[in-house]
């Protein structure tokens, strides 16, 4: 959300689009951390599946 807000206040659509791309990259990074959390048993498989489902929903929004 912070990447989107920062990009929104840039001077051009090109800059805004770049920050939207950063946001998608941050989402991918978050899922990567969730795999680690799952492996370390900080979260359950059910929680992981729900997070992944929500992340896929956000990823597909254009």
Image (cartoon, rainbow, N blue to C red):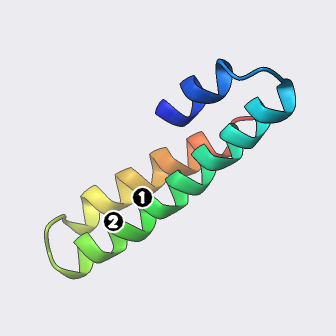
Residue ID at (52%, 53%): 26
Mark 2 and mark 1: Cα distance apart in space: 6 Å
Whether residue 62 is situated above or below residue 45 in the rendered picture: above
Which mark identifies residue 30?
1
User: Pointers 2 and 1 in contact (CB under 8 A)?
Assistant: yes
Which class describes the residues within 10 Å of circle 1: few (<14), some (14-19), or many (20+)?
some
**Residue 4 location, quadrant:** top right
**Residue 38 location, quadrant:** bottom left
Residue ID at (65%, 29%): 7
Which mark identifies residue 60?
none
Specify whether residue 1 is in view: no
Whether residue 19 is situated above or below residue 43 in the rendered picture: above
Specify whether 42 is left or right of 13.
left
Q: Nearer the viewer, residue 60 or 23?
A: 23
Give percent across and percent down for residue 14. Answer: 85, 34
Which mark identifies residue 34?
2
């Amino acid at each position: 959300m912070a990447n989107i807000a920062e990009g929104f206040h840039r001077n051009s659509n090109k800059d805004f689009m770049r920050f939207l791309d950063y946001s998608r990259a941050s989402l991918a990074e978050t899922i990567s951390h969730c795999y680690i959390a799952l492996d370390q048993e900080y979260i359950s498989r059910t929680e992981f599946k729900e997070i992944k489902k929500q992340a896929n929903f956000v990823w597909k929004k254009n």
